[in-house]
Amino acid sequence: MRIMICGKGGTGKSALSVLIARLLSEKYKVYLIDSDESNELLPKLLGTNPPRPLAEYLGGKKKIFKIGEINIVKALETASGGIKPSGIPEKYISRSPEGIGLLTIGKVRKLGEGCACPFNFLTKVFLKNLSLDQGEIVLVDTDAGIEHIGRGVEEGSDGVLAVADPTVESLTLAMILKDNCEAGNKDFWLVLNKVTPEISEILRKTAEKMGLEITGTIRYDPDIFRSSLEGKMLQAGDALEDVKLLLKHMNLL
């Protein structure tokens, strides 16, 4: 199964991606794809070193569009057909202490180097042609916002988990994601993140008025904020129990 974890900036997608990956790794072989061209913290949160960007394997960002989808697939596919995470060269994948495989699509780092469009294209092609073995799950930590919808990245996914923080803006973006998932016959889940009991009730009422069904709620967890602030391997307390419940509601645990 291929699940994209989406939402506006600051909702906690990366931290939630790590917690989900850890819990699922107890039952599945999990791969986490970093498709956010801006963030840097994900490897540290996961407890591993950054892998070489997958875009580099294809000759760099500027060559991705020139290569095209067919040749990208040819460059990445295995002898048995399709792109398999296990077939990616080792230096382009790193592993957490739990055995979670981390892949990075690419990063924008230089003045004037251009937009992240080639990275979105590569993510789309990678997911569409991904061949998973039984018991394998791929999670995608997406870039902030919903530009990836315009790039058609969701085409290669089986479902979208929308992460909403205590703002109406995040619920509005979740509504757009929901509509696109329904149009594309994809699974859709919504989780409220970083909430207190009082805020949770307000968000639930707002979501209900918008026609959004909430799959789970993740409490504000100071352990997450502390480890993120210190740039260390992610620690979680109450939030971890909430994520377990979320995954049960998603029928993944």
Image (cartoon, rainbow, N blue to C red):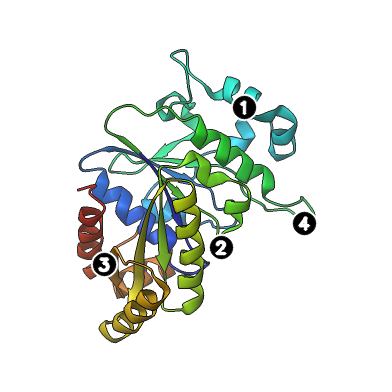
Residue 6 in the image: above or below residue 140: below
- Viewer-nearest of labels 2 and 4? 2
Image quarter where the N terminus lies is top left
| Residue 100 appearing in the image | yes
Q: CA distance from mark 2 to mark 1?
A: 26 Å
Percent x, y for residue 145?
A: 56, 62
What is the CA distance from the residue labelled 2 to the residue labelled 4?
A: 22 Å
Q: Amino acid at mark 2?
A: Gly
| Direction from residue 99 to residue 248 in the image, left or right | left
- Residues 160 and 243: in front is 160
**Nearer the viewer's eye, disc 2 or disc 3?**
2
Question: Which mark sits nearer the N-terminus, 3 or 4?
Answer: 4
Please tell me which of labels 1 and 3 falls first in the chain: 1
Residue corresponding to mark 4: 111
Q: Quadrant of residue 87?
A: top left
Disc on the earlier residue, 2 or 4? 4
Mark with earlier residue (2, 1): 1
- The three-letter amino acid code for the residue at tag 3 is Ala
Q: Secondary structure at mark 3?
A: helix
Circle 3 Cα neighbour tier, 10 Å, few/some/many (<14 / 14–19 / ≥20): many
Q: Is residue 10 left or right of residue 111?
A: left
Tell me, yes or no, whether the two marked residues, 2 and 3, touch with CB atoms within 8 Å.
no
The foreground one among 159 and 59 is: 159
Q: Amino acid at mark 1?
A: Ile
Q: Is residue 78 above or below residue 68?
A: above
Q: Are marks 3 and 4 in contact (CB under 8 Å)?
A: no
Q: Position of residue 3 (x, y in %)?
A: 40, 46
| Disc 1: which residue | 72
Label 4's element? loop
Q: Could you say which disc has been placed on residue 145 in the image?
A: 2
Q: Which residue is mark 3?
A: 239
* Amino acid found under the numbered disc labelled 4: Leu
